[in-house]
Image: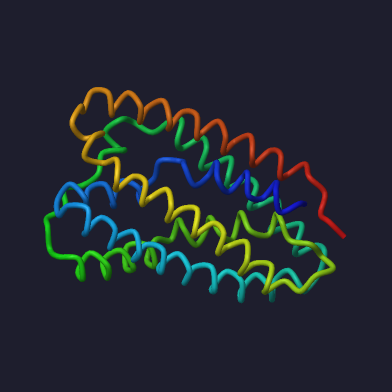
Amino acid sequence: MSLLAFTVAAILLAITPGPGIAYVVARTAAGGRSEGLASCLGTGIGGMLHVLAAALGLSVILAQSATAFGLVKYVGAAYLVYLGVRLLMRKESDAVAESVKSQGTRRALFEGIAVEALNVKTALFFLAFLPQFVAATEPLVPQLVLLGSICVVLNTLVDVIAVFTAERLLQRSTVRAARARLMTRASGITMIGLGIFLALTRRES
């Protein structure tokens, strides 16, 4: 599957509202733009830790057999559909970020790393998403690291945009809530469609 197709899918997933965006927005509201950007850097570093772990682990699994690849592929696609269903079923109260107190940019950086590195959902997502786009004839680890790095960069860029726009969005809570509901539903449908599409796509040889 082409790098272009992966990039399009990664962009769609990057703009999906989730805990990462909620966290950096809450950090920005508590400590200003500097803390928000520091938290973005932290979540980016934490994301790269997941990428490296996924690349090393998946390279061992996927190199074993076509059966192992097929298992990872379909389980991963099913997980993406599950995430989409969860988004569609999520209540409005579930999307509200927890209150975060201002504690300085250095603390925001390290907390950002911890929040992302300890997020099991991020690990599961990379395990589900990355194998869908690798070519069987090429070395697995470089492919997985490249694809994962693209995901992390896109996610971090979206987080940075969220930081720069947080103050304006937070000024009108009603409009913000309506936008969040719309984006959540659209993202859920996108996730389900992506999971079905990937399940039906044949592996490159």
Q: In terms of depth relative to the viewer, which is nearer, 99 or 80? A: 99
From this view, report whether residue 152 is shown above or below residue 52: above
Which image quadrant: the C terminus?
A: bottom right
Q: Is residue 6 left or right of residue 47?
A: right
From this view, report whether residue 104 is shown above or below residue 17: below
Render colour scheme: rainbow
In the rendered image, residue 30, in percent from the top left (x then y), is placed at 14, 51
In the rendered image, residue 160, in percent from the top left (x then y), is placed at 36, 51
Identify the residue at horizontal 83%, vertical 56% (top origin): 204
Q: Is residue 137 left or right of residue 110?
A: right
In the rendered image, residue 33, in percent from the top left (x then y), is placed at 22, 53
Identify the residue at horizontal 19%, vertical 69% (top origin): 107
Identify the residue at horizontal 59%, vertical 61% (top origin): 127
Identify the residue at horizontal 45%, vertical 36% (top origin): 87
Q: Is residue 50 left or right of residue 113?
A: right
Q: Is residue 195 left or right of residue 108?
A: right
Q: In terms of depth relative to the viewer, which is nearer, 156 or 49? A: 156
From this view, report whether residue 70 is shown above or below residue 142: above
